[in-house]
Every structure is written in C-alpha cells, then in structure tokens.
Image: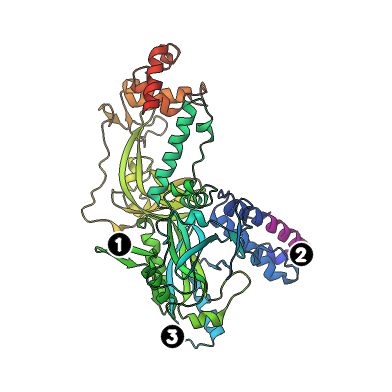
Amino acid sequence: MPAMSDLSDLDTMTPAEAAVELERLSLEIAEHNRRYHEDDAPTVTDAEFDALRRRNEAIEARFPDLVRADTPSRKVGSAPSAKFAKIRHAVPMLSLDNAFADEDVADFARRVRRFLGLSEDAKLAITAEPKIDGLSLSLRYEKGRLVSAATRGDGQVGEDVTANARTLDDIPGELTGFSPEIFEVRGEVYMTHADFAALNARLLAEAGEGAEGGGEGARKARQFANPRNAAAGSLRQKDANVTKSRPLRFFAYAWGQTSELPGETQSEVVAALQAMGFQTNTVPQNGRTEPLMRRLETVDGLIEHYRRIEAERASLGYDIDGVVYKVDDLEQQRELGFVSRAPRWAIAHKFSAEQATTVVEEIVINVGRTGKLAPLAKLRPVTVGGVVVSNVTLHNEDYVAGRDADGQPIRGGRDIRIGDTVVIQRAGDVIPQVVDVVIEKRPDGAEPFLYPDHCPICGSKAEREINPRTGRLDSVRRCTAAMTCPAQAKEGLKHFVSRNAFDIEGLGETFVEELFDAGLARQPADLFRMEFDRLRDVIEARRRA
C-alpha cells in the first residue's frame, strides 16, 4: 500500500482498486475517529490522520461514482458514547476543511469571492484566530441561564455533559449583560501545559500510593499523552466531581442556535462573548490582554498573521494546531452556507505536525554511567506530532556550538543559547531534536553556553579523549573519576537492575535512586546483602513522603 500522503498511484488506479481502497480508508478513518473522540486515546498523529482523509478525498474526486454511503468526507466526529445521555444539536456542530499551504488559503479566498460574486478588488474581510486543540463543547443558555452542555459527538447528536461543564470556572452559569430567549455558545475545553504536567504528576503519585498498599495502581496508572486527551478525558467523566478536580478551561469562539445575536460580524459577536463572561483568544501584551483574532482584508495579511501566531505558539501556554479563517460578515456567511460537513465560509490553516517553535529555558548537564557529560535543553513545553516536548538532547558540546564532529558548521553555524527560540522536530516522529535557531529572536545579552571541563557532580576533570580509530578528538567529554563519581555509580546501578541486565522486578529507577541516596546500595553487590530493617525504613520514608 502507498504511504498515506502518497497520491502517485491515483493515475494508474482502476475502479476496482479504488473501491477496495475506499472501503479500507473508510474503516481505518472510522476506527481512528473512535479512538480520538470516544476513547480520548488516538494512535496516530494529526498529520497521519489528515493524510488518510486527503487520500480518501483525492480518490473520491477521481472516482465520484464510487463515493460510499459511509464516506468519511461527509462525517463529523464520532458517535456519542453510550455512557452518557444524548443531546441533539439544534444547529449541527460541523467540522472545518483544512488548508496545508499558503496557496490553499488563496484558493479559499478565490472560492469565497466567486461564490459571492465579488471582484478581485472588492473588499472581503476575513478573521484569523488560533485553532485551539481541545474538545468542542456547545453550551445552551435560555434567558441567560445555562441549561445544558453537549460535546460535538457526530455533529448531530452529542453527549450530555451538563453537570461536568458546570464545574468549570470559565463557563458562567449566567450570562452578563445579554440574556436572549436562546443563545448557544460554542468553544473548546482545553488544558494548559503547566496544568497538564501537574495533572500527570498527580495521577502518577496517586497510582504509586495504591501500589505501596499492595495494589496494582502503579502498573495501571493512566497518564495522558497530551493536553487534548487530558481535557477530553477529564470532561467526559461519569462523576462530575472528577471533572471538578481537573484543571479544565474553556475558550468561546462561536455559537449555534440563537434567538438574537449581539453583532453583525464574526468579530463583533466574539467581542460580545467576552463581555458576557467568557474567555476568548487573547495574549498578554504590555500589561494588558491583546486579542489574538485579527480582522484582515488580504490573503497576504492572513498569511502574515498565521506566521505571527505560529512564532508565538510556544509562548501561549496551551496547544493550538493552526489558524482558523472565517468570513467576517454574518450575512455573507449565511449566503455562503455549508457543504456536507463544513461551512464554505471558514477553513483551518494547519501547522506542520512534525515541527514547532519554542524557547530554551535552561541547559543542564547530565552525567551517564560511562561518564559522558550529556547536555539537555529544558524547553518551554510545546506539542509536536501529538506529544508534549519539554526536553531535548543536545548530544555534545560541538552540537551546542553549531558544528559537527569534523568541525563543519551545522544549523548555519548557529550555536544554542539559553533564551534562544528554536525549531523542534521529532526525528522519525519519535526523538525530538533541534533543527534550527531563530537568531532574530535571540534575546539581548544571551551568552554562548560555557561547556564544563569538570564533572558537575563530583568535580573531577572531564576530558575529550583522542579516538584511537580515527585519531581525532572524541565528540564526547567524559568525567575521569569512573565509578567513584556518584553519578556514574548511580547510573551503573540503574543499568544493573534494568531489563537489559538482571531485570530485577520491583526495582525501578526512582527506588534505586532512593536506595543509593540512603547509602544502602552503592554497587551491585550491595543489592544482595541489604538488611531488612534498613530497607523497611527506606520504604516507610518513601510512603510518608
């Protein structure tokens, strides 16, 4: 089978092959939708999922007679879970078509102009705002009071999560200054990077407490892969008290059924949502909050704002996966209308899922079991390919300095400094790495990183030896203290009990560190002659902590 993003076989594909491929894609996309929307546990990245959809749509465009009744191109989300009561949306909650390149945005503007009968020089106002990566939610207010809350579900019917939604501080029980007969507010439930990290740490600690009592907690601890999964899983709880204990937030950016609107444009209604008591997309700026939504009249302006939001992505503190463009005039929106699963008047310009921009907050040196001084960059957390990245290896001092093992420049010779804005990529969609440094954003006074020539743990000299095979200076600097260095001894002990060595069950890295720090195990032989009373003291201290 061709790669998901490969469409080169379409020209030679027969109708019979197309029918088989459309059936396969329909089943695979449906399963991924179920894992994403129902289980809150996707198994592919957004980019991989988007590639599946693009392949399906391309085959349908070439073989329109073969479009299936269950085609993913006409579906939104996934069927609501049987765990919840159902709410039918008075106005369907649709999805958005995607743009992946600047030319796709230009095509969108041309299609809108053509449909509206506008000339190239006629004004066309379009809003641009960050696309929040969370869980879509519709809130129904009657005479200004919240009466129900529903997830997107399949776009027609969603899950009733009213009790859960009432626990969110960002969702007012009563609207401020605006109380029409009916007003449905739509937006996204999300979780910040800091809250996500704290929640995962808490879940792990709670599971560890269960394991100490003889339970299976530690082995079954469910930590979330990213903030979107955490937000969705936390809102979709049968017990609203669990939802209340989770740090969920809500951004409002749209509406469904209304008996009255507080404006005649997209931007006016969004401003009114903020006045009603909702959070909308803003960013701190010079002591005040500045809206991240812009009203623009040229494609170049839209692309420029897209680039600005992409550059500021890491500083927002929450996940976005693109920028949404919407025709601003609501009368024009009504005239444009909808296709099967998306409005004609809006499109999502997606970011590359494999790369993201963030900031180096600290560079630390770790010492491994062989004495290697390994530099690690502590990053402002950012989601890359569906995974939150907060650390990235910098390999060795040459890599930090912007050169390879032969002394040739890498990244254009740009070194990496604390405070630098860097471009992160997941190599092979697995291992994060720094692929570039944005020199224009380097803060004034940022100094080159001073690589230590002594071990930061024991103070012994750290040297780069001559490689006997090449006769050149080795790329790695090592502590010369060998196993008398506490860091090397501790890492050696971890390796000894690991799966690749003695595979000692129940001795995880954290427990080994505690035994080492307590003086009970400084070398492998100590593990076989520990006194029970002293071991019990360590376990009791661990439980109390």
Spatial CA span between label 1 and label 2: 55 Å
Q: Nearer the viewer, residue 320 or 6?
A: 320
Identified at 43% across, 13% down, the residue is 525
- Which is nearer the N-term, disc 1 or disc 3? 3
Q: Point out the stretch of residues depicted in magenta.
A: 13-27
On residue 284, which mark appears? 1
Spatial CA span between label 1 and label 3: 31 Å
Spatial CA span between label 3 and label 2: 45 Å
Identified at 41% across, 70% down, the residue is 273
Q: Which residue is mark 2?
A: 14
Q: Quadrant of the N terminus?
A: bottom right
- Which is nearer the N-term, disc 1 or disc 2? 2
Q: Nearer the viewer, residue 130 or 371?
A: 130
Prevailing secondary structure of the magenta residues: helix
| In this picture, residue 442 sits left or right of residue 395 | left
Query: What's the image's color scheme?
Result: rainbow
Q: Which SS class for mark 3? A: loop
Quarter residue 397 falls in: top left
In the depicted structure, whether residue 476 falls above or below residue 157 = above
Q: Which residue is mark 3?
A: 123
Picture coordinates of residue 235, whole percent (x, y): 50, 52
Label 3: few (<14), some (14–19) or many (≥20) C-alpha neighbours in 10 Å? few
Q: Which SS class for mark 2? A: loop
Picture coordinates of residue 290, whole percent (x, y): 32, 67
Looking at the picture, which amino acid does disc 2 mark? Thr
Question: Which residue is most to the left?
Answer: 445
